[in-house]
Image (cartoon, rainbow, N blue to C red):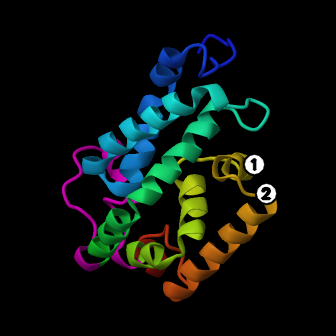
């Protein structure tokens, strides 16, 4: 990073693409798995390119704007995401992550979710799931999630709270981040 302000999409879309494609692709892979990630990322940038003249920097920064578009594109793939999460719930986490970085990332992605957590996330209403996963997987702030989804800051907080409550209830009060060994010690 050079410290320069991020490029405006209408002026330098090539820079927007270069700067943010990998991050949007990773987010899509965590939500839908690696097979759909390339398509979702490409659709996100195609839609962003089409909307580039309507981008309003007063509303959100470019990164947040792209996450909003990506979340809408993912919403179109919602059936795929829900099926993938339910499949993970039935089959359990993938085996054989090659290195530590992959194992860590897989613990928070659709590929490595504990079966019960994957099922609980799949059962969330779409709005709650989108907020939860933008916070958990994209590391967006509440303000950024609000701007990305076009909802109020308060709605982000309430959806996140409801999602967490539903997850805790679905998981019998356990912390979904902890492994079985950590829970039972």
Q: Is residue 101 left or right of residue 125?
A: left
Q: Which quarter shows the C terminus?
A: bottom left
The front one of 47 and 142 is 47
Residue name at image x 61 percent, y 74 percent: 163
Q: Which mark is residue 155?
A: none
Dot label at residue 153? 2
Q: Position of residue 87 (x, y in %)?
A: 26, 73
- Asked if one can make out residue 7 in the rendered structure from this viewpoint, the answer is yes
Q: Residues within 10 Å of mark 2 (few under 14, many from 20)?
A: some
Asked where in the image residue 136 lies, by quadrant, the reply is bottom right
Q: Residue at x 53, y 22 (%)?
A: 16
Give above or below for 65 relative to 126.
Answer: above
Q: Position of residue 82 (x, y in %)?
A: 37, 70
**Res. 108 in view:** no
Left or right, residue 68 beside residue 150 = left
Q: Residue furthest left?
A: 96
**Residues shaded magenta:** 90-116
Front-most of residues 53 and 79:
53
Describe the element under mark 1 as helix, strand or loop.
helix
Q: Which label's residue is closer to the chain start, 1 or 2?
A: 1
Q: Is residue 114 magenta?
A: yes
Q: CA distance from mark 1 to mark 2?
A: 6 Å
Q: Quadrant of residue 76?
A: bottom left
Residue 167 sits in quarter:
bottom right
| Of 13 and 95, the residue lying toward us | 13
User: Residue 143 has which mark?
Assistant: 1
**Residue 64's spot in the image, x, y percent?**
63, 39
Residue 6: x %, y % from top left: 65, 19
SS at circle 2: helix
Mark 1 near mark 2, Cβ–Cβ under 8 Å? yes
């Amino acid at each position: 990073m050079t410290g320069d302000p991020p490029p405006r999409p209408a002026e330098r879309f090539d820079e927007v693409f270069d700067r943010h494609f990998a991050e949007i692709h990773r987010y899509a892979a965590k939500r839908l798995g690696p097979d759909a990630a390339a398509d979702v990322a490409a659709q996100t940038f195609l839609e962003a390119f089409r909307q580039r003249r309507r981008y309003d920097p007063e509303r959100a920064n470019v990164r947040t704007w792209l996450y909003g578009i990506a979340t809408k594109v993912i919403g179109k793939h919602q059936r795929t995401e829900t099926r993938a999460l339910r499949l993970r719930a039935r089959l359990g986490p993938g085996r054989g992550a090659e290195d530590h970085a992959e194992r860590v990332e897989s613990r928070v992605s659709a590929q490595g979710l504990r079966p019960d957590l994957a099922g609980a996330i799949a059962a969330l209403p779409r709005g709650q799931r989108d907020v939860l996963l933008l916070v958990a997987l994209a590391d967006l702030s509440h303000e950024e999630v609000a701007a990305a989804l076009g909802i109020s800051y308060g709605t982000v907080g309430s959806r996140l709270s409801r999602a967490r409550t539903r997850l805790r209830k679905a998981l019998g009060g356990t912390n979904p981040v902890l492994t079985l060994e950590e829970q039972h010690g």
